[in-house]
Image: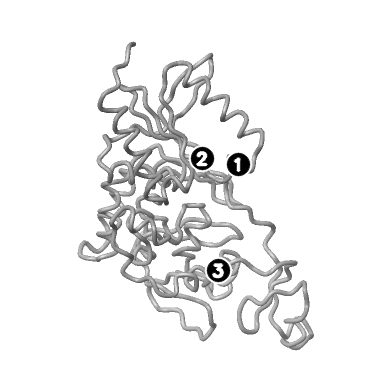
């Protein structure tokens, strides 16, 4: 079952002007609240500073002549589809006894850069804050503001050396579990496991980045609807718990609930609650009611927050609780 991922919110494409077209000097434009610098000599009429994604979209069109092979890739392309690519805190590496990414330096700088891919003749520019990568040969698709976006699998391979193993797994979980709407186009995209495997088969077989994604795909699972669900599952498996079913449907009182991690043969489940559950009062109230219904129907539900994953003592307690419940609990059906 695929869920609809909410698309990245982008407004109308801003008007882009060269410095000479504004009739002002660059020093004057920098001080102008409604003018945002795209790159040297190029400005966007926009009320707020450009995000890395917005800047990448504008640069792709500005640097790409008609017939250009430039496309937005890397973090920018993944952010457009809201695939959960991001930094990994040190405690995660410790919890999973997982090595750090091959390339860790300047992660934040990479996230702030505009990242474009090229094929054929390489684009030449002295513009700062732009990272270029050679195309790996996968196709592109139409993006917002009439741009071209690299295939998500290629974009993931591009940034894989800077991602921890669990984060790559989380990105693949999301790719397989969501139906994506490309902002500004209305076009939807799906990336089932078979499509991802097919894409990887066309990429360099001895590439470390390609093999890192291929390895992560072996641990990926669907349906999974958040990166923290992925992390919770990986911690559970690392601690020796039986493999859970994900987003397992349970019908109680004519309502169907989906449990993040479930061991249905034992009626045992783990639910991870992120920030949205605390910020949204109505959602929190419904969540508590939902847990009461599940427990009344015989389910043993353990509710987790981030500190239950991060703190070794708290993590040990819930893992042992689930271990006991899945090894000794007798369930009557």
The 10 Å Cα crowd at callout 2, few under 14, some 14 to 19, many 20 or more, is some
- Contact flag, marks 1 and 2 (Cβ < 8 Å): yes
Q: Which residue is mark 1?
A: 278
Sequence-first disc among 1 and 2: 2
Q: How is this picture coloured?
A: one colour
Under circle 1, the secondary element is: helix
Task: From this view, report whether residue 235 is shown above or below residue 70.
Answer: above
Q: Which residue is mark 2?
A: 273
Q: Locate the C terminus and report the quarter of the image it occupies.
A: top left
**Closest to the observer: 138 or 239?**
239
Q: Which mark is residue 56?
A: 3
* Marks 3 and 1, how far apart at CA: 34 Å
Which residue is situated farthest in the front direction here?
A: 313
Q: Locate the N terminus and report the quarter of the image it occupies.
A: top left
Tell me what residue is drawn at x 26 percent, y 34 percent.
242
Whole-percent x, y for residue 24 in the image: 78, 86
Task: From this view, report whether residue 183 is shown above or below residue 53.
Answer: above
């Amino acid at each position: 079952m695929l869920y609809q991922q909410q698309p990245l919110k982008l407004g109308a494409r801003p008007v882009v002007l060269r410095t000479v077209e504004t009739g002002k000097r660059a020093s004057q434009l920098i001080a102008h609240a409604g003018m945002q610098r795209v790159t040297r000599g190029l400005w966007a009429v926009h009320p707020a500073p450009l995000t890395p994604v917005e800047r990448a979209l504008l640069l792709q069109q500005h640097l790409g002549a008609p017939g250009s092979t430039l496309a937005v890739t890397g973090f920018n392309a993944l952010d457009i589809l809201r695939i959960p690519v991001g930094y990994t805190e040190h405690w995660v590496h410790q919890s999973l006894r997982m090595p750090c990414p091959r390339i860790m330096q300047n992660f934040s700088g990479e996230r702030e850069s505009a990242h474009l891919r090229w094929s054929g003749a390489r684009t030449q520019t002295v513009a700062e804050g732009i990272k270029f990568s050679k195309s790996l040969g996968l196709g592109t698709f139409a993006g917002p503001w009439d741009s071209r976006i690299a295939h998500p699998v290629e974009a993931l391979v591009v940034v894989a050396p800077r991602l921890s193993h669990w984060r790559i797994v989380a990105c693949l979980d999301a790719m397989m579990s969501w139906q994506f709407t490309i902002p500004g186009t209305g076009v939807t995209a799906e990336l089932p496991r078979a499509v991802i495997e097919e894409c990887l088969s066309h990429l360099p077989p001895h590439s470390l980045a390609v093999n890192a994604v291929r390895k992560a795909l072996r641990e990926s699972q669907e349906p999974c609807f958040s990166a923290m669900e992925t992390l919770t599952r990986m911690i559970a498996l690392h601690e020796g718990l039986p493999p859970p079913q994900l987003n397992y449907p349970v019908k109680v009182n004519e309502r169907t609930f989906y449990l993040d991690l479930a061991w249905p043969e034992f009626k045992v489940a783990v639910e991870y609650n992120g920030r949205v559950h605390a910020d949204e009062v109505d959602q929190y109230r419904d969540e508590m009611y939902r847990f009461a219904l599940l427990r009344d129907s015989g389910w043993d539900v353990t509710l987790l927050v981030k500190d239950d994953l991060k703190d070794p003592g708290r993590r040990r307690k819930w893992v042992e609780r689930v271990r006991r419940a899945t090894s000794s609990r007798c369930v009557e059906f």
